[in-house]
Amino acid sequence: MKEDNEKIVCPVMDKHIKVALVGQPNVGKSMLINSVSNAHLHVGNFSGVTVDKTEVFFDYKDYKFTVVDLPGTYAFTDYTIEEKVTHSYLCAEEYDIIINVMDSTNLEKNLQLTSELLTMSKKLVIALNMSDEADKEGIEVNAQYMSELLNIPCVKVSAAAKTGIEELIETVVKKFEGEKQEPKLIFSEAVEEEIEKIVSYLQKHKYKAVNSYRNIAINLLKENKKTYEKLHEEPLWTELQPLLVEASKHIELHHNTDDIKEAFAEEYAAFNRGIVAEVVKQTTAKSEAKTLTEKIDALLIHPIFGIPIFLFFMWSLFQLTFTLGNIPMDWISAFFTWLGTTIAPTISNDDIRSLVVDGIIGGVGAVVLFVPNIIILFIGIALLETTGYMSRVAFLLDGFFHKFGLHGQSFIPLVTGFGCSIPAYMSARILKNDRDRLLTLFIIGFMSCGARLPVYVLFTGAFFAQSMAGNVLFGIYISGAILGLIFAKILKITAFKGVDEPFVMEMPKYRLPSLKLIWHTVLTQTIMYLKKAGTFIAGAAMMIWFLSNYPHNANLDKVYNAKIEKSVSVKQKVLLENQLAEAQLGKSYLGRLGKLTEPLVAPLGFDWKMNVALQAGLAAKEVVVSTLGVLYSMGGNVDEKSKSLANNIRQNIPFASAVAFIIVIMLYLPCLAATTVFAKEAGSWKYAFYLFVFTSVVAYAFAFIGYRVTLMLM
Amino acid sequence: MKNLLDCDRGEKVKVSKLNAEYDLKQRLISFGIMKDAELEVLAEAPRKKTIEIKVGKMRLALRSQEAEQIEVKEI
Ligand SMILES: Nc1nc2c(ncn2[C@@H]2O[C@H](COP(=O)(O)OP(=O)(O)OP(=O)(O)O)[C@@H](O)[C@H]2O)c(=O)[nH]1
Ligand SMILES: [Mg+2]
């Protein structure tokens, strides 16, 4: 009402239209928004890409649009958390109009949700998406006729080919300005009869309502909670109730079931079959020949070869990550060295020069160095997500996962975890059962995220030959995953006991992702990484620099400078200078802090620098590398000729300590941001505390074993 | 009675009854698996732990425990 007034008072003001985008999973809702606006919502070819509502804003003519992208839902049964998000949004929030997005190649299934949407009594527009795919498959949809049959405007669109988008928006605007119309939905005679009885009863009593009597009657019969509660308070309820009980009995009898929901599902299915028969034409003769998807599946989900093929893909990915990713590394490294040496002479103040060159350039450079490796990893994950292979692997691994107390669908959050733990924690929402979800949340951290990759690449590059490093990298990831599975089993039989949840998952058809889609997905993630390097990591590097430079001990300077002056050879002089720097570093705040807790990590073979780097890594894993970069570039015992961080590490860290270090990185707490999201998704900070204890104990124990075993073998 | 797990690869059958508990039953129904729906078994994972079926135009993965709860008859 208030809005109406405003419109009258101020007619030139832009009009706001709030659209809720609803549809079954994987029909292209998010992609549709991306093609309407310039948003970059996450798109992937499996069910459950979007797990939270996201608002996108754009202008069209005089209208200001707000489009809400909602998680896909098969029906309003609140089966999983993400489906609850959608259902409660539709029931409780304010919005003007619903766009129901459908996959044109499978209307019959998609219409099932539409039937439920009709009970919301909101303005509705149907977007028949994937019309390009329908054309290719020889499926012809008569949108005009469909609009008439349903009395809902239907528009053919393709989010991928960007066709029909303008028409869709125009239709939404028209619907927004126009009156709400009663959609047509015809049930079987038996049900229509019962609806008629209730409607005439409401008419007789002149019941006042916003919605039509027919809508109320259907909702009552479907046992819609809200409608029930509302009428429950009315005086006419006493007479209405027996009427309803009678009606339900008739309908159930007609459908030979004792479940009214099942009866209505069958009613809808019958109606939808009728619609599809009228509006959809298969132009090319439906041949018995296998579809492309079936042909590919014959190989990729082969009972024997399926899993080895998957492992081969993963192995290739890590090989590429290492070999291909290391090519541009020299250039980036050269660039930062050049930057440092060019900037250094322009700064006269010693401290500021060191801050800029050793602190900022050293720290940020160390992180940026690994961007190529990260890009390759991201491309791999993007391919897995957008081709449709993801669901296949979930299918292949379900039996195996089940043994470890996990759910096949856990694979999706776990794989997402190889990119970044934050979206991984969120995507665990696709799991129905809270116990399954918690269990998955607890082991997502064992899947090493992209930010840990730099540490691995750095260390494998430092200690292994080029030809082996890729294999070692693969080994690190796989052993992390295997440990995760083992801990899943342990947690399942101790902390998260319970019944197994059903596994029912849609397998999408294979889709060749466009280069643009991959490019955008990878670009968004890479920019995020770089942004983090430029802001958070730069800040952290500055802090590390500060803490490792102050307080400056003048006494030490005096003692060493006297010795240096007396020294005879250049070699001895350099040695003394290095010793001075090392001594100063040891006396700094950071040095003291590191040394204070050094006894704790001494059994793992860590010196205080590694100790500090690990602690800094609690904030973000990239900081581990930048901290090592700062500490080892300032530390004294560095051969001046081999400035590269990898060389410094090889010279200063014993192999066994390096192994223990990698193990800790693999297993300990994810970064601060991820831990926060973990606490939110798990439902309480209590769980974050458990996670901290759990991962710390595990990391310490395994690092200790790793250290001892390596020492013994060497 | 025959259930979906008893079916061989490539076999086409019709659903006669869903024996699943409430939640799963609603889920199956929302996937279109309801009385008289036609199903086809497409593939099996190792040791038939998981199977892939076709409902209408959709492909669906089911665990063996779930498949057992779907009673079917030959067409
Ligand atoms: N050929 C074709 N593919 C499309 C079209 N729209 C979307 N896709 C593809 O369909 C898949 C699903 O797209 P999304 O936008 O992630 O689907 P969604 O509806 O948001 O899915 P959820 O978030 O899981 O509910 C992706 O692989 C897209 O590339 C289209 O119009 N044509
Ligand atoms: Mg989406």
Image (spheres, rainbow, N blue to C red):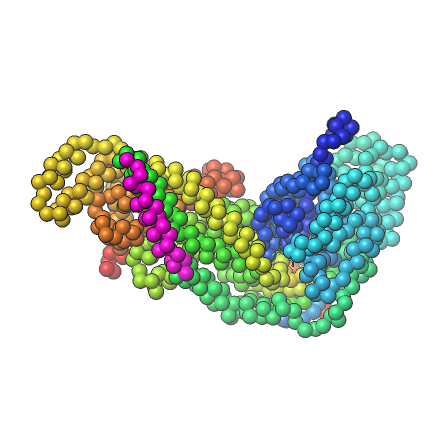
Residue A306 x/y as whole percent: 52, 67
Residue A175 x/y as whole percent: 78, 43
Asked whether A120 or A566 is in front, the reply is: A566
Residue B4 x/y as whole percent: 65, 65
Residue under the point 37% across and 62% down: A471
Residue A344 x/y as whole percent: 30, 41
**In this image, A128 relative to A343: left or right?**
right
**In this image, A419 relative to A287: left or right?**
left
Asked whether A483 or A427 is in front, the reply is: A427
| Quarter of the view holding residue A289 | bottom right
**In this image, A142 relative to A436: left or right?**
right
Report the predominant secondary structure element of the magenta stretch: helix
Residue under the point 46% across and 56% down: A377
A335 part of magenta stretch:
yes
A396 part of magenta stretch:
no
| Extreme residue in the right direction | A204
What is the quadrant of the N terminus of chain A in the image? Answer: top right
In the rendered structure, which segment of residues is drawn in magenta? A324-348
Residue under the point 51% across and 70% down: A304
Q: Is residue A692 above or below residue A266?
A: above
Quadrant of the image where one finds ligand 1: bottom right
Asked whether A124 or A413 is in front, the reply is: A124
Residue under the point 72% across and 38% down: A62
